[in-house]
Amino acid sequence: MWQFFHKLGSPRWFHGIASRFMPWLLWTGLLLSLAGIVWGLGFAPRDYLQGNSYRIIFIHVPTAFLAQSVYIMMAVAAVVTLVWRMKLADVFVKSVAPVGAVLTFLALVTGAVWGKPTWGTWWIWDARLTSMLILLFLYFGVMALGAAISDEKSSARSVAVLVLVGVVNIPIIKYSVDWWNTLHQPATFKLTEKPTMPPEMWVPLLLVVLGLYLLFGWLAFYRMQTEILHRERRTRWVRSMLSSGEVS
């Protein structure tokens, strides 16, 4: 276990192992996502209260789930950066922060589209919506801070601290519907409870969630590989790959 953990600290080893997993992540993620979306948008039954407007759930919920999960992953990587000084952890944080920002933006936009027919308004300063907007600003802050500091080590430490400070927002997002009076509905999935939706609705939703996580894995590996090649461009192994045509 520890040997594998230390191997992850090697940019060259990670670059190679990521290349093996990326095709599986990409095609499996695409298959699951498309199957879930087609099933949910085309064949799932209408909701007895919201009609067909609820179908935005098949985009909104997966993006909202993953937007929060990405930040939690970044927080774990930030701990690794500060405690073990592992360069690859910083590579992960800076590679996936833009992805998390896009996911959060999509969650906010699809939530607004869903909120208009359901609540009668595009936006309200609801606890869940406001905390998700704060998450978007946190992603922007991580990206800006990483770009503002030229020294790699100082940048890694500063970004890691900011990520850990911001992670307190994640439980606020999750429990906001329980702690305050809010228009936002409770969680769609709970590990300790049976889903309130029929299987014809929650199964395609679960497929999209799983597919999107796999697609995130592929995109994270791709962006990390790109960042590694940039940082290690002066090393012998990268020059060897470039000269042999393995990467362009």
Image (spheres, rainbow, N blue to C red):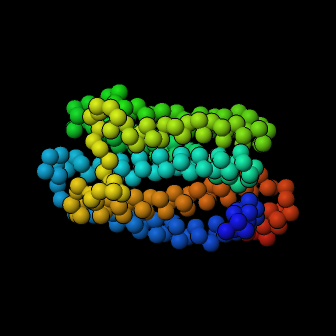
Residue 109 visible in the snapshot: no
The residue drawn where x is 51% and y is 42% is: 101
Name the residue: 55% across, 62% down. Answer: 218
Relative to 92, 207 lies left or right: left
In front: 93, or 22?
93
Quick check: 219 left or right of 189? right
The C terminus: image quadrant: bottom right
Task: Give how far across and how far down residue 113 sits, in percent.
Answer: 30, 40
**Residue 142 picture location, percent across and down:** 61, 38
Is 187 drawn above or below residue 138 in the view shown?
A: below
Q: Quadrant of residue 200?
A: bottom left
Residue at the top extreme, as displayed: 125
Q: Residue at x 27, y 42 (%)?
A: 185
Image quadrant of residue 107? top left
Q: Is residue 8 visible?
A: yes
Point out the image quarter for the N terminus: bottom right
Judge whether 131 appears above or below 87 on screen: above
Q: Nearer the viewer, residue 16 or 198?
A: 198
